[in-house]
Image: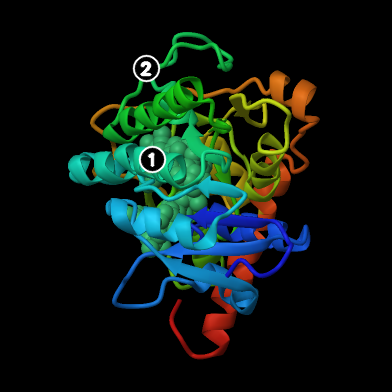
């Protein structure tokens, strides 16, 4: 596996939204890309199917220390992007222990593997704006105190601090990217943006009438996933490791998202959206708004896709997908 001279990148979470965009970008840059996959009874590589012949898959699970060490030892990557996590906030209340094991302790397992195999390997940790939770200031920066509101948020705080701690304890090049919500046509269908754009497509094409949602007042700083994986790579190319907020710098409510998504296909969202208490959370993050001034100044990073463009490209992609299923006689 170590025969070529190309730079080697290992991505945990390659089958997820961000892993797929990051893999495409790194391949374009000439990297050899190794994707960590865990054993499942059915294949989960749908998001990377189009590039699977250019990837090398290695098996490991973030809950299993030995497998993580073996994978890193076998590949000897120059860069590790730790994107694997139980990443759905509501599930973190249903499965808090699992969320802690994967999303928190999993980070230590990756850091430990790097520490024992080769401390010069650079590591990116996928931290989250969910760490700001019940925000103590707006906008949120790298200096804003953390106040997580879910077992997921708490686990990400652990992941953030253990990354900083390994950097300070062992001099490792480990960075924490504090990324605000980022979406795409590859976003999981359970997350609110994709749930809305998928619902809009089905309603427009006549296979559904109502869309059940939870808190419409929640405000998020939404960006485009493809823009955000560029920031991950930039963070690993600096002279010194550091932590960065990555955000769009704008905040919109779930209601705004509905209005834009339904409006894009000429529908009135109020005729179709039903507020359903089943989707309310035990504790909510009401407002997120990130300030990415540090990333702009030090990494030269800027988001390229606006909120309106993001909504439209997601709706268009779902319309095309649902229409294709209908054309093939499959009820989407
Ligand atoms: P995602 O689509 O949910 O993908 C999660 C990935 O983690 C999947 O590839 C999944 O593999 C893998 N995974 C889960 N448990 C694992 C385990 N025990 N061992 C190995 N792999 C495991 O997440 P995403 O949206 O791409 O986000 C990427 C990362 O950024 C996550 O850490 C997330 O928490 C964080 N983040 C996301 C956002 C956002 O807005 N998207 C914002 C801030 C931070 P399977 O396919 O096998 O399930
Ligand atoms: O919820 C509200 C919900 O599930 C956004 C993950 O990638 O980003 C994501 O976490 C908001 C919340 O994302 C529904 O109450 C209303 O206020 O799309 P979401 P999230 O919880 O912000 C962060 C940065 C991460 O790190 C996470 O990994 O939308 N909302 N109605 C709803 N949410 C969902 N899912 N479904 C609804 O029906």
Marks 2 and 1: CB-CB under 8 Å? no
Seen in the picture, residue 154 relative to 189 is either above or below; the reply is above
Q: Is the CB of the residue bearing disc 1 within 8 angstroms of ligand 1? A: no
Count neighbours of disc 1 (C-alpha within 10 A) and say few if under 14, some if 14 to 19, many if 20 or more.
Answer: some
Observer-nearest residue: 203 or 183? 183
In this picture, residue 80 sits left or right of residue 146: right
Secondary structure category for the residue under label 1: helix
Quick check: is the Cβ at mark 2 less than 8 Å away from ligand 2?
no
The image shows residue 33 at horizontal and vertical percentages of 62, 63
Q: Quadrant of residue 4?
A: bottom right
**Quadrant of the snapshot with the C terminus:** bottom left
Which quadrant holds residue 41? bottom left
Q: Which residue is mark 1?
A: 112
Residues under labels 2 and 1: Cα distance? 27 Å
Q: Return the residue at label 2.
A: 147
Compare marks 2 and 1 and give the one earlier in the sequence: 1
Query: Nearest the camera: 289 or 16?
Result: 16
């Amino acid at each position: 596996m170590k025969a070529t001279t190309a730079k080697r990148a290992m991505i945990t979470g390659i089958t997820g939204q961000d892993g797929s965009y990051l893999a495409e970008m790194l391949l374009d840059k000439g990297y050899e890309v190794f994707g960590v996959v865990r054993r499942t009874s059915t294949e989960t590589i749908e998001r990377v199917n189009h590039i699977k012949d250019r990837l090398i898959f290695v098996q490991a699970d973030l809950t299993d220390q030995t497998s993580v060490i073996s994978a890193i030892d076998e590949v000897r990557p120059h860069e590790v992007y730790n994107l694997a996590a139980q990443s759905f906030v509501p599930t973190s209340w249903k499965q808090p222990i699992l969320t802690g094991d994967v999303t928190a302790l999993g980070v230590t397992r990756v850091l430990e593997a790097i520490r024992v195999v080769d401390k010069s390997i650079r590591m990116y940790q996928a931290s989250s704006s969910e760490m700001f939770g019940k925000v103590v200031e707006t906008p949120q920066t790298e200096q804003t105190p953390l106040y997580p509101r879910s077992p997921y948020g708490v686990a990400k705080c652990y992941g953030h601090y253990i990354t900083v701690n390994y950097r300070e304890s062992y001099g490792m090049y480990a960075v924490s990217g504090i990324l605000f919500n980022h979406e795409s046509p590859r976003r999981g269908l359970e997350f609110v943006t994709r749930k809305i754009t998928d619902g809009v497509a089905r309603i427009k094409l006549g296979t559904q009438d109502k869309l059940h949602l939870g808190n419409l007042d929640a405000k998020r700083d939404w960006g485009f996933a493809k823009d955000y994986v560029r920031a991950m790579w930039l963070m690993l190319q600096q002279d010194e490791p550091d932590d960065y907020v990555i955000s769009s710098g704008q905040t919109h409510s779930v209601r705004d998202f509905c209005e834009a998504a339904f409006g894009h296909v000429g529908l009135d969202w109020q005729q179709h959206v039903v507020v359903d208490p089943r989707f309310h959370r035990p504790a909510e993050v009401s407002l997120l708004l990130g300030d990415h001034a540090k990333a702009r100044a030090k990494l030269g990073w800027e988001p390229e896709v606006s909120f309106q463009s993001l909504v439209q490209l997601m709706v268009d992609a779902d319309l095309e997908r649902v229409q294709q299923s209908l054309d093939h006689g499959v009820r989407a």
